[in-house]
Image (cartoon, grey):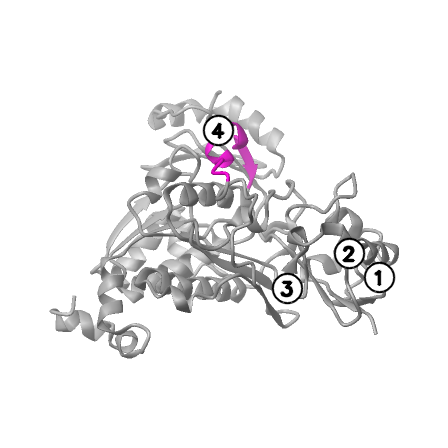
Amino acid sequence: MTADPNALGRYARQVVFEGVGREGQRRLGESRVVLVGCGALGTVLANMLARAGVGFLRIVDRDYVELTNLQRQVLFDEQDARDGVPKATAAIEKLKGINSDIQYEAVVADFGPENAESLIADCDLSLDGTDNLETRYVLNDACVKLGKPWVYAAAVAGYGTFMPIIPGETACLRCVFPDEPEVGSIDTCDTTGVLGPMPGIIANFAAIEALKLLMGVHDRLNRGLTWVDCWYNSTQRTPVETPAPDCLSCQQRIFEYLERPVWRRAAALCGRDAVQVRPSNTVELDLPALARRLLVVGEVRQGPQMVRLTAPPHELTIFRDGRAIIKGTAEVSVARSLYARYVGT
Amino acid sequence: MSVRVRIPAPLRAVTAGESEVSVGAENIDGVLAELEARFPAIRQRLRDDEGALRRFVNLYVNGEDVRFLQGLQTGVKSGDEVSIIPAVAGGC
């Protein structure tokens, strides 16, 4: 990297910074990062890490771009929303124009127990751009199991929180929050809304921690759980720095969230009136056949990755891997039933 | 003098918007009892049906998690600060 004067030129402002230098930049350039979730947090994380010059960036996201995303998801535009492009693909198209030196990989899939380990195993760091806690517990278990650092980040309404996690060294997510909140018991973008800059602020905090982790500057880590409230104007750092002695994940090494029974097949999606349903087995749908079958039900649009059925008041987007995002309901049971009717079980 | 309890934004819906509450209890159980007397709806957010602390909302006394102290029996004294920090899920 240092041999290429143009590469250094691009990164000049951060190489000059005392905490980075040529060695830090070299390390960033050799690093491999996986981003799980590419929404409000994820687009900002991806943007900053691509600009900072990581070597490889994998973006995993199950969703597609919609107009209501544009208020805060900084890598997407109106054309992406009109085309309903998968977020991972749309983000990488933008990032290629920002930094073409990086190797990118888009994974249009749900991050879950069946693929978590393989998606993080060849990376140095995992980043949290997810929109629910269940996926974060999967990510935590996978990272702890493989000994990979990650950065917890979450934001809603006008507040958010983040915590860098190094398995075996710092507390992990389950040390701090041993149980997942019950469904419907905490704020989501649906019920509470979100101010656009808030996830951006948290994601930028998380991005700084990511750079420290990738450069190996662990003594500068912002350890513990930091709470930032930009509406009521307070910040608070909770020094939960060491593992909980009884932690199921990082101390007992029982990875409940990597076991299938814990994982739900259908989950309401944060941020809108929608539910995602996943097949319990690995499938590969014949999309053209499905599209033809659905013509009698409503308006059908077919893309390379998905079939979209509009049957008011519902809209089903069905992906090749059998996942479906069902809009127009927040009821898991209604979504399951629509899935069964239109996709089949 | 009393114990200050900091209420995070997501719980202010059940504390009539109060961001900080002063209580005169001697332990965490007493702190919660006073909060619950003033704001009954907060109980369900902090405790399960058996009255135990929920494991996705943390209580800290001067920055120390009460789970690693004496839980509900953790003592508090005048001038202490109790923080409530819940798990956050959003990101979309």
Which mark is on residue B28?
2
Cα–Cα span, label 3 and label 2: 14 Å
Marks 1 and 2 close (CB-CB < 8 Å): yes
Circle 3 is placed at which residue position? Answer: B63
Asked if residue A106 is among those painted magenta in the image, a careful observer would answer no
Above or below for A1 versus A147: below
- Looking at the rendering, which quadrant does residue A45 occupy? bottom left
Task: Return the residue found at the far right.
Answer: B37
At mark 4, the secondary structure is helix
Marks 3 and 2 close (CB-CB < 8 Å): no
Q: What stretch is highlighted in magenta?
A: A252-268
At mark 3, the secondary structure is loop
Instruction: Check disc 2 and give the amino acid type.
Output: Ile
- Viewer-nearest of labels 2 and 4? 2
- Viewer-nearest of labels 3 and 4? 3
What is the x, y in percent for residue A241? 52, 59
Asked if residue A257 is among those painted magenta in the image, a careful observer would answer yes
Do the residues at pointers 3 and 1 share their chain? yes
Q: Earlier in the sequence, mark 3 or mark 2?
A: 2
Instruction: Check disc 3 and give the amino acid type.
Output: Gly
Residue at image coords 77%, 64%: B17
Q: Which of marks 3 and 1 is nearer the N terminus?
A: 1
The mark total stands at 4
Which mark is on residue B25?
1
- Left or right of B21: which side holds A117? left
Cα–Cα span, label 1 and label 2: 7 Å
Circle 4 is placed at which residue position? Answer: A260
Pick the front one: A107 or B25: B25
Marks 2 and 4 close (CB-CB < 8 Å): no
